[in-house]
Amino acid sequence: QMQLVESGGGLVQAGGSLRLSCAASGRTGITYAMGWFRQAPGTEREFVAAVSWSGTNTDYATSVKGRFTISRDDAKNTVYLQMNSLKPEDTAVYYCAADLLPPNLLYLEGLRGDYWGQGTQVTVSS
């Protein structure tokens, strides 16, 4: 079993920045893509960004391209989401997810979510 623990959410004004982190633990000897979904009240969960195990491949939702950057640490077990130029419509609970995949691959849809974190709230005020 794999555990994913998010941190870094909070309240920020529009135009500001936040950095989310997600640390994975519990399984060794496997490779997995990691990334983020988000869910705003009354809406369905939507894909935000993903990065392959190797870090060489990334994917972003159209709504965050050019504003958000996903990255992965050298140990491969922590993923970061740098969020700049935040907008009120970015307000949501952000969930970390992981997919068991070979080192350079991502699903066409970005992530499917073999494993999930508990979520962290991001609120952007206008």
Image: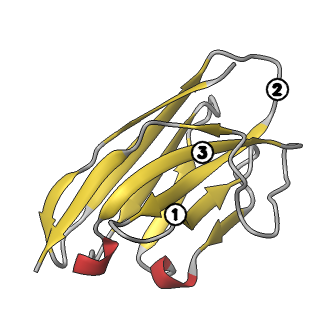
In the depicted view, which residue is nearer to us: 46 or 110? Answer: 46
Q: Residues within 10 Å of mark 1 (few under 14, many from 20)?
A: some
Residue drawn at point x = 27 percent, y = 74 percent:
86
Q: Quadrant of the C terminus?
A: bottom left
Three-letter amino acid code at disc 2?
Ile
Q: Of the two numbered discs 3 and 1 on the same chain, state the one appearing first in sequence.
A: 1
Judging by the rendered image, the residue that carries numbered circle 1 is 45
Q: Quadrant of residue 124?
A: bottom left
Amino acid under label 3?
Ala
Residue drawn at (47%, 38%), measured in percent from left and top? 22
Quadrant of the rendered structure where residue 103 is? Answer: top right
Residue 13: x and y, percent?
11, 71
User: Are circles 3 and 1 on residues that touch, CB within 8 Å?
Assistant: no
Q: Nearer the viewer, mark 2 or mark 3?
A: 3
Q: Is residue 87 visible?
A: no
- In primary-sequence order, the first of circles 1 and 2 is 2
List the residue tagged with mark 2: 30
- Disc number for residue 97: 3
Distance from the alpha carbon under mark 1 to that under mark 2: 26 Å
Q: In x, y percent, where is residue 83?
A: 35, 65
Quadrant where the N terminus sits is: top right
The color scheme shown is secondary structure
Residue name at image x 65 percent, y 23 percent: 2
